[in-house]
Image (cartoon, rainbow, N blue to C red):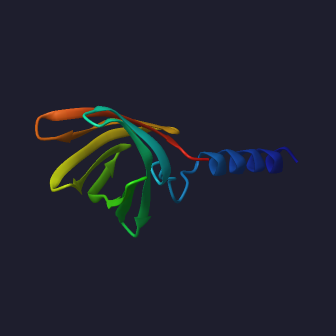
Amino acid sequence: MKKVLFFIVVALIVYGCAPSKKAVDLSIGTWDYVIKDTPEGDLDGHFIIAKEGDDYTGSLNSDQGSIVLEDITIEDGNLKCTFDFQGYEILMKGTFEGNSYAGNVSVDYNEFPMTATRRE
């Protein structure tokens, strides 16, 4: 009986320590954002990150419409992408941490802080 109990305990420990087959990508979802201190004031809306196969897709959305996020890379929770706004290429960089995102958007020599919270 002790041997059977021992094997059951060992099996439970091994099973509990085994890595999961698929890690959860915490960047995927809808994020409510604020970009602070732009020449037009604070800008808000939401951005969406999705994954199709090995590639990320996304869009930046506000009352003015939707803009496609391009060249999206996410590594170790760090996002880097670009988007076109009124003829300017904007660089968006930041870090996902739990349900929060912090980073910035840059154009030419100007940089504006950006924060976001994941929608539930």
Q: Quadrant of residue 116?
A: top left
* Residue 18 place in picture, x, y as percent: 57, 50
**Image height check: is 113 above or below 27?**
above
* Residue 30 place in picture, x, y as percent: 50, 52
Pick whichever, 84 or 69, lies toward us.
84
Q: In this view, which residue lies farthest toward the left?
A: 108
Q: Residue at x 36, y 63 (%)?
A: 57
Q: Quadrant of residue 48?
A: bottom left
* Residue 46 place in picture, x, y as percent: 45, 49
Q: Residue at x 20, y 55 (%)?
A: 86
Tally the numbered discs: 0
Pick whichever, 87 or 72, lies toward us.
87
Position of 27 with respect to 86 (left or right) is right
* Residue 113 place in picture, x, y as percent: 31, 31
Position of 108 with respect to 33 (left or right) is left
Q: In this view, which residue lies farthest toward the bottom?
A: 53
